[in-house]
Amino acid sequence: STTRVTYLLENLDNTNFTANSTKLNVTDVPDLAAADPTQVAVNSGLDLQRTVNYFVSQSFDFKDRYIIDALYRRDGSSLFGKDARWQDFYRVALAYRISEDFKLPGVQDFKIRAARGTAGLRPGFSDQYETYSLAGGQISKQQLGNTNLKPAIQTENEYGINIQFLDRFDLELVKADRLTKGAFLSIPLSLAASGGFLNQVQNAADVSAHTYEVSLQTRVVDTDAFSYSFSLTGDNTRQKIDRMDAAPFRRNATGAQGQDVFYYKSGEKLGVIYGTKWVRSFEQLKENPANASANAADYVVNSDGYLVRAANLGKSTEAPIAYVNANRETQHVIGDVNPDFSFGFANNLRFKSFTLYALLDGVRGGDIYNFTKQWMYQDERHGTQDQAGRPVADRRPLAFYSAGLYNGLVANDHFVEDGSYARLRELSVAYNVGQNTLARFGLNRQIKGMKLAFIGRNVFTWTKYTGFDPEVTAGGDFNFRIDGFRYPNFRTFTGQVELQF
């Protein structure tokens, strides 16, 4: 039995001040005194956060068979609205080691476990306050304050099985169900009802999630001279908005005008992309009641796979046709960012004094919205607009891309791409220099051990995604796979020398 009582105080004081100018009146004098007074921007910030936490935990272990762990926690944070500063949380976990009571052939350890717990998600520093913007000497209202802003309470039920068998395999299976009540959403407001404010952060939604995880570790070979082991992991997660205290609305996930690609409403799965679909066949065109009398001879599918008017093919007037269904709806589901599963494959190999570690991970399925590509279409700067390598008959006029598929930055299915990838996340090779080698150079008296290593990270990526990096996310409310001029993950290589004296 173990009992623990904890008190935790967190204080964060962050003060910043910046000043910059885009024009110098005196050339090559990088000093604000030489700046044009009309081009100087001054900004400052004061961020004060206070958090108080009380914990009481209790654990029991009876005969190495029955394990109980419980925790109670009370949190107070200045990040919550002034009328909702404190919140209680708890955790209870149970485990039973079946193999201690029942001997199973080939099984060294067999444990089943279950746990239930709550956690609080904190809002951003400014979410509870009224905010204003100042531009050109004009003050405008932005966010309405919320003194009742509470933590988003996440309750999770987790069930797991752990099995060690055949003296070399460790298997773990986990199912987790999570419900987040009072999830934070920035809700658009009526200007008349809010007194001119544009939005307000509210505990506006309940979001449920279901996750399945599997992990397998094994020691394939283990001798004095050679060993090899690996681990496999995989998981699948789905999330849905169960309740939302607001009218359904589209969400801008990149901060770019016009890119409201996600739709929030009760019953909607998180991560579904909405937008314009382009007609790819005459049958699709006929679904629109307005095209009931259309003649198939007047249309043709171009070399990019889109239906266009035959009379405009190859001309500057060639343009894609927006799909309208039988209900005259113009906005449709065009993608889903949720992967079918994520995976990891870690390898450890040792041969005498050499060791090698390689980690491969990635995702299967799930779409990415390539907003970077869409933005570049309007400026005619994307590589797919280069027609030089195509047969003359297959070349499309630039206006087909810059005026048509570009679509005024409104989301459309041309920019939805498969986000599957596999990445060699890490590759390291190390050599442990033996005492005989050190003695040969007369170093064994001063140095007890030496290791030389070479480490590469983000070494290589296999993907069909046409952007820089398929591992992209954006958005403030939730993370979505939308590529809005995001920097790719850097590829790094490091050399290491480790000495023991």
Image: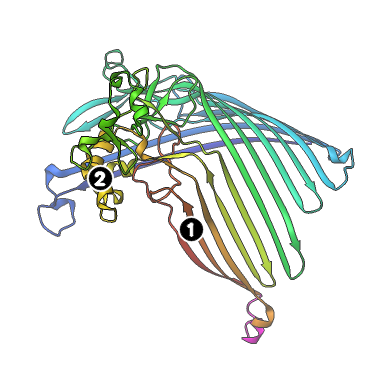
Task: Specify the amino acid type for callout 2.
Answer: Arg
**Quadrant location, the C terminus:** bottom right
Q: Which residue is mark 2?
A: 396
Dot 2 lies on which element?
Answer: loop
The region drawn magenta spans 438-448
Whether residue 70 is visible, yes or no, is: no
Task: Give the x, y percent position of residue 222.
Answer: 76, 63
Residue sitting at x 31%, y 19%: 292
Is 445 covered by the magenta stretch?
Answer: yes
Question: In which quarter of the view is residue 54 placed?
Answer: top right
Quarter holding the N terminus is top right
State the residue position of label 1. Answer: 460
Q: Earlier in the sequence, mark 1 or mark 2?
A: 2
Q: Which mark is residue 356?
A: none
Q: Which residue is at a point 66% across and 52% down the rendered structure image?
A: 231
Left or right: residue 197 compared with residue 351: left
Q: Position of residue 8 (x, y in %)?
A: 57, 36
Observer-nearest residue: 302 or 49?
302
Neighbour tally class for label 1: few under 14, some 14-19, many 20 plus, Cα within 10 Å: some
Query: Residue lying farthest top?
Result: 193
**Dominant secondary structure of the magenta stretch?**
loop
Residue 420 vs residue 5, the one in the foreground: 420
Residue 118's place in the image compared with 485, above or below, is above
Q: Position of residue 257 (x, y in %)?
A: 28, 33
Q: Residue at x 11, y 58 (%)?
A: 27
Measured in 3D between alpha carbons, the distance from the residue under mark 1 to the one under mark 2, in whole angstroms, is 33 Å
The crowding category of the residue bearing disc 2, from other C-alpha atoms within 10 Å (few below 14, some 14 to 19, many at least 20), is many
